Image (tube, rainbow, N blue to C red):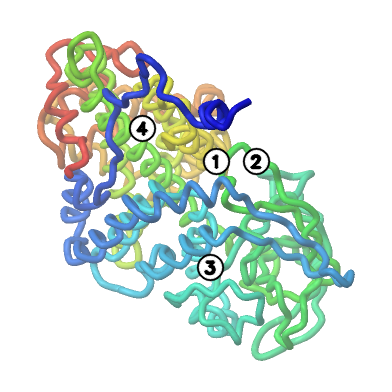
Amino acid sequence: MTDQSLKAAGSPQPLPGATHAVFNQAPPLEANLFAGDHALVDAVDGFGGGWAFEHLSDYGAKTGGPLMALGFDANRYTPELVTHDRYGNRIDEVRFHPSYHAIMAEGIGAGVHAFAWNERRPGAMVARSALVYLHCQAEAGTMCPLTMTFAVAPALEAEPAVARNWLPGVLSRDYDPRPLPAAEKRGLTLGMAMTEKQGGSDVRANTSRAVRVGHEDGQEVYEITGHKWFCSAPMSDAFLTLAQTEAGLTCFLLPRRRPDGSRNAVHLQRLKDKLGNRSNASSEIETRGAWAARVGPEGRGVRTIIEMVHHTRLDCALGSAGLMRQALTQAIHHARHRQAFGKRLVDQPAMMNVLADLALEQEAAMRMVMRLSQAFEARSSEPQEAAFARIATAIVKYWVCKRAPGFVYEAMECLGGNGYVEDSGLPRLYREVPVNAIWEGSGNVIALDVLRALGREPAAREALVAHLTRSRGQDSRYDAHLDATLRALGSNDEMEFRARRLVGDLAVALAGAELMERTPQSLAEAWFASRLAGDHGGLYGTLAPGVDAAGIVERAAVAA
């Protein structure tokens, strides 16, 4: 072969009629996820968090830009369990890609884990909820350690000596992943280890045992032996856990290192191979006489840890609403730039119906979780708000988390084949979203919790009914739905069998009340017509004619 022919054979040649011209594709979307979300801005302002706009806008720019990119890497390069060092010493460490640490540092620096506890002013809980809502859109897996670190703070206050030693690190805005004793770190993250393989949600069936061994630095100290089936974020500095004492199930703080700096007897058995939430490690752990400090009285473990559970349930609902928002944002962006059959997708009537239906569902979810956040903030000084938060947390968590998976799927379909490809981000959202419905009480557990609150806590029932009836008289469809729901509340006939239907009806009423009180009339009108009056096919995209679909979609589109 001649030099000429070698050169010709080895060089790429332009193909006749080359077809790889890229057109009719949506451009990359980078936006400020706070400043560009008119409904979120309005909700935060309406619930007293307007003073935090600058901070939220700064974080919205990060979550809509650099953190979004880091999220892809954090999920592509998943955590790795390293049980032993090269010499054979047990180290029980989980190693993460640098992108995970970068996202954690930004989240903790912004106060996703502690903004409400650090600021202590009206609107702080609402502003913190907005941070969660933004963070989940960029990378939801890291929310697990952030949520648990947030939720542990009120539970630790049940034991002043433990709170004194741990709360300063929990509330720190420094991310410090080094495997050091708590006293040597700039900031701490905390986790939770409650579930055992034989008990699942029935934590009273736990078999882990705790034996008191002494008193140190004002703390009652125990040794715990047992096995936990699910321990999320196992590189946390400590975990709230449950174990049996002679008095019954008791709550403990279980650190990864003992106060003297030595490794605690907490052994990581394996990492779970999960459907989603892949940037976050979840593990099985074994404790063999592990050092732990008691939190709260012996035998009152569930009552002690329930405060943490309530706060994690709030974040489950926030996380699902945030994932829904990001899926909707991608769907609308694609439809506004993609053409088919001579028109933009967003101008096609069938697509407009789908997008408007999704936007309606998403704003209802966001409004409910922000109203719930306000109740969390007010509950320390307003007993009725405390009672409302008690029951509304379970109702909102149930509904928003249940609606989210189908919602994200429908948004994925709006992008067609493009949405099924990892680069779009929709598959990651789709895999991520089921965890919020399962974590901290799956559907039946949550629905039965609502029934317990209705039957055993008169204040919670009265607060819920009072909240819903305040909106009576403004729309006949709302009134009819509320009357039917209240009648169902008054009947004890097969209550557990119809628990899900009842909780769903309460959630639809809560959403309707929020939309009626706080949004343009077009949204409330669409909600009443489709969700309350039965003028809806059940699947998304089945709104009846007459709805201001274009206006609803335009309101939901992220502003550039």
What amino acid is at disc 1?
Answer: Val
Q: CA distance from mark 2 to mark 3?
A: 28 Å
Q: CA distance from mark 4 to mark 2?
A: 32 Å
What amino acid is at disc 2?
Answer: Lys
Q: Which residue is mark 3?
A: 155
**Under tag 4, what secondary structure?**
helix
Give the foreground label among 2 and 3.
2
- Point out residue 183 in the picture as x, y percentages from the top left corner: 60, 86
Residue 84 or residue 151, whichever sits in front: 84
Residue name at image x 16 percent, y 49 percent? 42
How many badges with numbers are in the image? Answer: 4
How packed is label 4: few (under 14 Cα within 10 Å), some, or many (20 or more)?
many
Q: CA distance from mark 1 to mark 2?
A: 10 Å
Question: Is residue 498 at all visible to an observer of this figure?
Answer: yes
Q: CA distance from mark 1 to mark 4?
A: 23 Å
Tag 1–tag 2 contact (CB < 8 Å): yes
Tag 2–tag 3 contact (CB < 8 Å): no
260 with respect to 352 (left or right)? right
Give the foreground label among 4 and 2.
2
Residue name at image x 11 percent, y 30 percent? 474
Position above or below: 543 against 164: above
Q: Which residue is mark 4?
A: 506
Quadrant of the image occupied by residue 384: bottom left
Give the foreground label among 1 and 3.
1
Name which of mark 4 and mark 3 comes first in the sequence: 3
Residue name at image x 63 percent, y 71 percent? 237
